[in-house]
């Protein structure tokens, strides 16, 4: 099963290149405090120095390190390098660039870190992907994390400890992550931050390996042996002791490993446990543990890989197969899209398709229904039949409709004039309803998504232009029909309608009519002796003169008038009566008579009853007009309009031209699918091998 780990490393590489990061694969996270020797351990596992050095915090971004044995398993698995390749490194952010000089790898890590963080000492969770191929290593996948710190220094943010802790916990919380917890031999194991964090996510120690560094820096070695043998703090996977090499020493990995083995073998204290110490033993232990985890995660890895591959296949399907699927019949391709688009538009309106983005909101035809019932109908129902009509206006209309004679009954012409005025008020909201449905149809049009049409943006844009023009042409005929509905209601006031004065309205009108007749008889009785009331109040002008400007007679004071009457009693002559001038604007007084009040109430009853009939008719007819003249006409005519305007041979090339973005994405999908299919084939082969074994 040695080929398992190279395959996982290859999966990591493929996912990094294709932009996928959701597939969790077994990895080994190196956790420890600053200056605990993490860099020395990693470089010892790789066999070459490649990590930046310095004081304080040096690792500022997670480093996903994949080390592959050169020549070990490449016969079984297709690796990402040639057979004649030499020891080298390669970064995911620089595809195809081979780094054979490890000093340049070190410089590139530093440069990529500064590219994101600048010259600050802050940290970022964005990882750097690095693959190192070497004959000196076993196949491992490691994650180097920033060293645990307590106090922010320099320009570091005040929550640097929290950031690093969150970054580490995010990586080691995954059940598939193997934790490499580093602790210096010359420190108290009880204060180890790495072991404390590992215990939080792995309380049973199933995936934690303790690494005791700097074993050569303890004077007697007894304390380190106690820790390595689990007497101080027990770990199920145990501990491995290592010697951190001198940074000033030559970078000879073979020599360093041999020296380390000799140190533990010949040491009087570490000698009995020398086989469980050293970088060589740590590498083999990590490889064995990683293989075990991969076996446990294999079904999940394959399931997620198949899911990613399915997504790529569906994406590729939406991009089509390039010019090959159009060369045979471009006209047939156009007809296919015309039919598909018109059917999608029709299905959205009729509720056969739902919105994926707004699962809790109304969509498509349901929004048109909302306009009809929750907006338009409720607005009409809330409108008062007497809105805008004052009592003075009603009384004036009654008086104007009687002509020179006083009517015994309420004149019908007054009722018709007033109710027509109210009926005309229904036109504006009805026309607004047309505009709202038109805007909603435009929104539905924009929401029509056909995945395979995304590759032909010219065709989609031209189709939208044609359909929008069709919609625009339907607006005026719809409005004209609604205006005609209002005119029809105004043309004939049908007082014989079965719902007119129905129920309480009839009783109310009869009572008002009886009161009006009674008031009329009393009014006639009070004026049967002539115009005495008028003479005594307004037209009793016996003064000496009449003021034409004011329209009233100017009288003298009672005293002067009496004196003249006495003095001129003998020769008094009759004086003429003068009428006041009629003003240009004549209006009724503010205090109505009993008869006028009753007549106004009767007119109100008639208006309310008849307006309710008309409102019901309009509320029922307007949505039907909109559906027939605009919605249904559009859905029924889309395909024919598209054919008549766009199905032309001279437009084939323009309409079927693909954008550069689509061509590029198709090539990327094909490349990704090729790699993913190869990975699936390798997985199937390994699964069969595991079952047979």
Image (cartoon, helix red, strand yellow):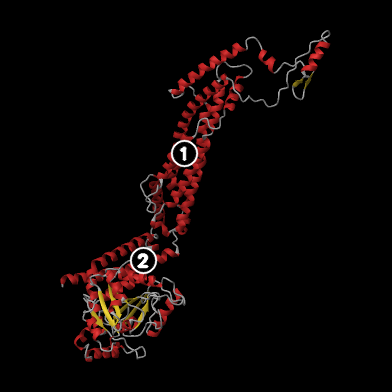
Q: Residue furthest top?
A: 570
| Residue under numbered circle 1 | 376
| Residue under numbered circle 2 | 669
Q: In the rendered view, would you say 158 is above or below 253? A: above
Q: Work out which quarter of the rendered image holds the N terminus and state it.
A: bottom left
**Can see residue 520?**
yes
Residue 462 location (% of width, % of height):
48, 54
Residue 22 location (% of width, % of height):
33, 66
Element on which disc 2 rests: helix
Q: Name the residue nearer the viewer: 61 or 653.
A: 61
Q: In the rendered view, would you say 604 is above or below 374? A: above
Q: In the rendered view, would you say 636 is above or below 242? A: above
Q: Name the residue nearer the viewer: 659 or 241.
A: 241
Q: Residue furthest left?
A: 693
**Can see residue 78?**
no
Residue 611 location (% of width, % of height):
49, 29
Quarter assignment of residue 106: bottom left
Q: Residue at x 52, y 35 (%)?
A: 427
Q: Name the residue nearer the viewer: 182 or 431.
A: 182
**Is the residue under label 1 in contact with that under label 2 (CB below 8 Å)?**
no
Quarter assignment of residue 406: top right
Q: Name the residue nearer the viewer: 477 or 166.
A: 166
Mark with earlier residue (2, 1): 1
Number of other residues with Cα within 10 Å of mark 1, as a class: few under 14, some 14 to 19, many 20 or more: many
Q: Work out which quarter of the rendered image holds the C terminus and state it.
A: bottom left
Residue 660 location (% of width, % of height):
45, 65
Q: CA distance from mark 2 to mark 1?
A: 49 Å
Q: Residue at x 28, y 69 (%)?
A: 201
Quarter assignment of residue 205: bottom left
Q: In the rendered view, would you say 321 is above or below 226? A: above
């Amino acid at each position: 099963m040695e080929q398992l780990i190279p395959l996982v490393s290859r999966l990591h590489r493929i996912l990094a290149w294709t932009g996928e990061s959701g597939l969790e694969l077994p990895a080994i996270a190196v956790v420890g405090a600053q200056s605990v020797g993490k860099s020395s351990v990693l470089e010892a596992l790789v066999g070459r120095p490649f990590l930046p050095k310095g004081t304080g915090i040096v690792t500022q971004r997670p480093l996903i390190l994949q080390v592959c044995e050169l020549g070990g398993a490449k016969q079984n698995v297709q690796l990402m390098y040639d057979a004649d390749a030499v020891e080298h490194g390669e970064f995911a952010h620089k595809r195809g660039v081979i780094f054979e000089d490890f000093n340049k790898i070190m410089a590139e890590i530093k440069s990529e870190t500064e590219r994101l963080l600048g010259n600050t000492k802050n940290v970022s969770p964005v990882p750097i992907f690095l693959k190192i191929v070497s004959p000196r290593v076993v196949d491992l996948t490691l994650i180097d994390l920033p060293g645990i710190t307590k106090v922010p220094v320099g320009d570091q943010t005040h929550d640097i400890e929290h950031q690093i802790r969150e970054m580490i916990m995010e990586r080691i919380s995954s059940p598939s992550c193997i934790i490499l917890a580093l602790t210096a031999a010359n420190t108290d194991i009880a204060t180890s931050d790495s072991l404390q964090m590992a215990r939080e996510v792995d309380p049973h120690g199933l995936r934690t390996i303790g690494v005791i560094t700097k074993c050569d820096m303890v004077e007697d070695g007894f304390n380190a042996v106690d820790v390595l043998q689990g007497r101080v703090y027990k770990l199920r996977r145990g501990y491995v002791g290592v010697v951190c090499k001198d940074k000033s020493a030559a970078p000879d990995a073979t020599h360093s490993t041999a020296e380390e083995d000799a140190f533990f073998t010949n040491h009087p204290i570490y000698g009995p446990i020398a086989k469980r110490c050293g970088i060589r033993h740590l590498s083999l232990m990590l490889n064995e543990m990683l293989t075990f985890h991969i076996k446990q995660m294999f079904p999940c890895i394959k399931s997620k890989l198949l899911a990613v591959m399915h997504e790529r296949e569906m994406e590729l399907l939406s991009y089509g197969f390039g010019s090959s699927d159009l060369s045979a019949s471009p006209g047939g391709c156009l007809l296919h899209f015309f039919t598909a688009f018109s059917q999608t538009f029709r299905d959205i309106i009729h509720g056969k398709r739902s919105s994926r983005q707004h699962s809790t909101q109304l969509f498509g035809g349901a929004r048109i229904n909302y306009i009809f019932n929750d907006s338009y109908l409720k607005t009409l129902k809330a409108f008062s039949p007497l809105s805008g009509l004052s009592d003075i206006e009603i009384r004036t209309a009654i008086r104007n409709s009687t002509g020179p004679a006083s009517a015994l009954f309420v004149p019908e012409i007054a009722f018709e004039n007033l109710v027509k005025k109210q009926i005309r008020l229904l036109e504006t909201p009805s026309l607004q309803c047309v505009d709202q449905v038109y805007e909603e149809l435009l929104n539905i049009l924009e929401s029509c998504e056909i995945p395979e049409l995304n590759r032909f943006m010219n065709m989609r844009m031209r189709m939208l232009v044609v359909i929008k023009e069709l919609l625009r042409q339907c607006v005026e005929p719809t409005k004209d029909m609604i205006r005609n509905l209002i005119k029809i209601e105004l043309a004939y006031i049908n007082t014989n309608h079965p719902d007119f004065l129905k129920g309480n309205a009839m009783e109310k009108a009869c009572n008002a009519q009886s009161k009006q007749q009674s008031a009329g008889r009393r009014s006639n009785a009070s004026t049967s002796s002539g115009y005495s009331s008028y003479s005594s109040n307004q037209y009793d002008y016996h003064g000496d003169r009449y003021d034409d400007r004011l329209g009233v007679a100017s009288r003298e004071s009672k005293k002067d008038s009496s004196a003249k009457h006495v003095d001129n009693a003998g020769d008094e002559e009759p004086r003429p009566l003068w009428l006041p001038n009629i003003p240009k604007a004549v209006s009724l007084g503010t205090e109505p008579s009993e008869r006028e009040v009753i007549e106004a109430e009767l007119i109100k009853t008639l208006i309310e009853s008849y307006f309710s009939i008309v409102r019901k008719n309009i509320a029922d007819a307007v949505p039907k007009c909109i559906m027939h003249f605009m919605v249904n006409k559009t859905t029924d005519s889309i395909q024919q309009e598209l054919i008549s305007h766009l199905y032309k041979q001279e437009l084939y090339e323009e309409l079927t031209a693909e954008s550069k973005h689509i061509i590029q994405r198709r090539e990327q999908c094909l490349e990704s699918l090729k790699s993913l299919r190869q990975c699936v084939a390798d997985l199937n082969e390994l699964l069969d091998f595991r079952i047979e074994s």
